Image (cartoon, rainbow, N blue to C red):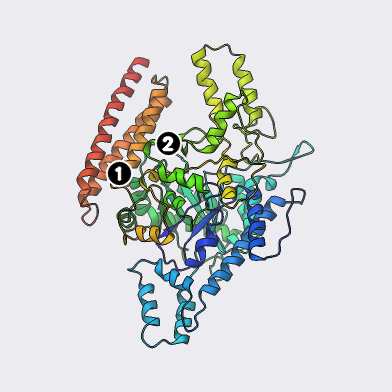
């Protein structure tokens, strides 16, 4: 499918982009829906069906396979409504619709299609010619879906575990596979071998006789090695990876999957250098698998897109990444939280985001998944958590249980942010007889967890004035560090014009370059890791710190060389970038000495 924009809106949280396709797909912009919360999807389907006077039949908890059915029904509704909006947009009579004008207005001024359209409707207006032009050239934005592969809670019936097909991620996959959408499934958060195998059950993930894949697979990865391993596993099953979506390990919103000190620039360079070899290797495995299944085998290698996201904040960075690494698209996530035309954020949280500074945005330990999580200080879900702790009732009621994955106390699983789990862990802690300092440290480690699977969808409910009696009113918000440099609510036109360099001053002049910012976050991360336990007691720990720091040092060397050879970008900021790199390199050198001393003490 043709792509008219060089950016996409990635999935954000659970609810922030849950209805984004309804707002931007007919305008040609790609976006993604999280499939974590089927309860939220059902509430929104009811709301939209009532609003748009569409038929609605509730899918209750007692209905067989209700989770998958809810997801299918919601996605079908999204598909049908966006199709209708797109078809109406394309209606050309004696004049163009406002939405059609908006469609072209959002395209960059350099767009060839935009200039062709202006020519088509200027001068002597030919209705048939205009209709044909619109029909031939306009495309909808892709309505993609995201599944976190590890959020795959099992289900029980009469104390017996049901087959894996009833697990949450499996049911979400089935819900998408049975929908009318022709788009992409984004698999994030690493490997789930059983889920990967489950893809084989659905024909829409295989190429048809014309090499067309109705439902494509996108892998969100943090490095090349992960992409190669996961891509080969899927290729051996006859599943083609149509896109590798590289996300900065730490300079992103939501869950942050830190690399081993590998930075975005070197990672993208590795993909650029190896793309052809990667594609050919996957193609060989892919075709063999299709032959073994007696399925249609494409004659030529299917296309593979490489995209990137995480921390991009200026048109210069956007254009540089596209040009230098030959990328197909750049994901702009965090800034879109400030665009009500595109995302679902309640007004109170929106004002908090606008006011947030660098010190308000931090890499937290609040996620029950045990993965670092980018958060904002003062979010109402964390305030709610602190109130519960003061009442001596830490933990959440856990109404949705999507991440009830810990089996220490129950084979059915508990969420580590739940009241039940934290009560049991604190009971264990009380029996240890620790001194007050050690006790508080252990207590805080238990109670820091926040009910994010509820908090990340509540903002959407509040925005649309939907019932939050079960969930409560606490909101979790997960912007990346980039949020500190955007301080106003923006229109869709403003943000797209900013991305394409057509307006200035939307971003703070004090914002550090994307590469420097990511490096700073990584140096902070590894420094904190070392300070938490500044004694290196075994070879594994030694290797971890030495490798991590060396990778960061090599990353600095890479960026210095990159800036030296770059002529058309960063001319005004090159000296500032180099100063930032040098400053972080000095911090790394100081940390290296501490690590060496720690190793010598142990030896």
Q: Which one is in front, 303 or 585?
A: 585
Is 56 above or below relative to 195? below
Q: Which one is in front, 332 or 214?
A: 332
Is 250 above or below relative to 51? above
Residue pictured at 71% horizontal, 41% vertical? 155
User: To which residue does mark 2 refer?
Assistant: 362
Q: Residues within 10 Å of mark 1 (few under 14, many from 20)?
A: some
Task: Look at the numbered disc 1 and give the secondary structure of its residue.
Answer: loop
Is there any visible trace of residue 174 in the rendered image?
A: no
Residue pictured at 24% horizontal, 52% vertical? 570
Q: Give the quadrant of residue 152.
A: top right
**Could you say where residue 405 lies in the image, as x and y percent from the top left?**
62, 36
Image-based side of 293 in relation to 301, left or right: right
The C terminus lies in quadrant: top left
**Could you say which disc has been placed on residue 127 in the image?**
none
Is 282 above or below relative to 450? below
Distance of mark 1 from mark 2, alpha carbons? Answer: 16 Å
User: To which residue does mark 1 refer?
Assistant: 512
Task: Look at the numbered disc 2 and give the secondary structure of its residue.
Answer: strand
Q: Which one is in front, 591 or 116?
A: 116
């Amino acid at each position: 499918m043709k792509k008219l924009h060089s950016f996409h809106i990635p999935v954000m949280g659970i609810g922030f982009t849950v209805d984004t396709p309804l707002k931007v797909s007919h305008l040609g912009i790609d976006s993604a829906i999280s499939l974590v919360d089927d309860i939220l999807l059902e509430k929104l389907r009811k709301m939209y069906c009532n609003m748009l006077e569409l038929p609605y039949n509730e899918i209750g908890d007692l209905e067989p396979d209700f989770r998958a059915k809810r997801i299918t029904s919601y996605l079908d509704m999204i598909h049908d409504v966006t199709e209708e909006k797109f078809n109406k947009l394309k209606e050309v009579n004696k004049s163009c619709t406002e939405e059609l004008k908006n469609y072209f207005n959002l395209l960059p001024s350099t767009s060839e299609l935009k200039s062709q359209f202006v020519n088509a409707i200027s001068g002597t207006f030919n209705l048939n010619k205009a209709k044909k032009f619109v029909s031939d050239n306009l495309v909808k934005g892709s309505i993609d879906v995201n599944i976190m592969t590890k959020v795959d809670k099992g289900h029980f019936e009469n104390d017996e575990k049901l087959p894996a097909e009833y697990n949450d991620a499996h049911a979400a996959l089935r819900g998408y596979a049975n929908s009318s959408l022709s788009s992409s499934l984004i698999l994030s958060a690493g490997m789930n071998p059983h889920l990967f195998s489950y893809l084989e059950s659905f024909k829409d993930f295989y190429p048809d006789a014309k090499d067309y894949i109705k439902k494509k697979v996108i892998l969100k990865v943090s490095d090349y090695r992960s992409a190669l391993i996961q891509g080969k596993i899927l290729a051996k099953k006859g599943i083609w990876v149509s896109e590798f979506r590289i996300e900065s390990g730490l300079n992103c919103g939501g869950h942050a999957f830190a690399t081993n000190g590998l930075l975005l620039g070197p990672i993208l360079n590795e993909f650029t250098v190896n793309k052809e070899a990667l594609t050919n290797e996957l193609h060989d495995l892919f075709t063999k698998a299709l032959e073994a299944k007696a399925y249609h085998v494409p004659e030529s290698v299917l296309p593979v897109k490489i995209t990137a996201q995480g921390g991009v904040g200026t048109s210069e960075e956007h254009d540089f990444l596209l040009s230098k690494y030959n990328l197909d698209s750049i994901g702009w996530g965090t800034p879109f939280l400030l665009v009500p035309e595109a995302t679902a954020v309640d007004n109170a949280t929106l004002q908090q985001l606008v006011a947030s500074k660098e010190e308000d945005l931090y890499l937290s330990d609040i996620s029950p998944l045990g993965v670092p999580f980018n958060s904002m200080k003062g979010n109402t879900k964390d305030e709610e958590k602190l109130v519960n702790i003061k009442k001596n009732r830490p933990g959440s009621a856990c109404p949705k249980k999507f991440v009830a994955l810990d089996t220490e106390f129950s084979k059915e699983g508990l969420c580590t942010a739940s009241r039940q789990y934290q009560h049991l862990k604190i009971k264990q802690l009380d029996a240890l007889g620790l001194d007050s300092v050690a006790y508080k440290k252990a207590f805080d480690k238990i109670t820091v967890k926040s009910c994010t699977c509820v908090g990340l969808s509540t903002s959407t409910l509040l925005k649309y004035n939907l019932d939050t009696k079960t969930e409560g009113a606490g909101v979790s918000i997960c912007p990346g560090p980039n949020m500190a440099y955007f301080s106003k609510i923006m229109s869709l036109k403003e943000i797209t014009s900013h991305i394409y360099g057509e307006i200035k001053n939307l971003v703070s002049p004090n914002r550090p370059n994307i590469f420097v910012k990511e490096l700073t976050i990584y140096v902070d991360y590894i420094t904190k890791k070392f300070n938490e336990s500044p004694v290196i007691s075994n070879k594994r720990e030694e290797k971890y710190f030495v490798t991590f720091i060396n990778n960061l040092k090599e990353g600095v060397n890479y960026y210095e060389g990159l800036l030296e050879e770059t002529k058309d970008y960063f001319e005004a900021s090159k000296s500032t970038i180099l100063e930032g790199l040098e400053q972080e390199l000095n911090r790394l050198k100081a940390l290296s000495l501490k690590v060496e001393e720690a190793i010598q003490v142990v030896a």
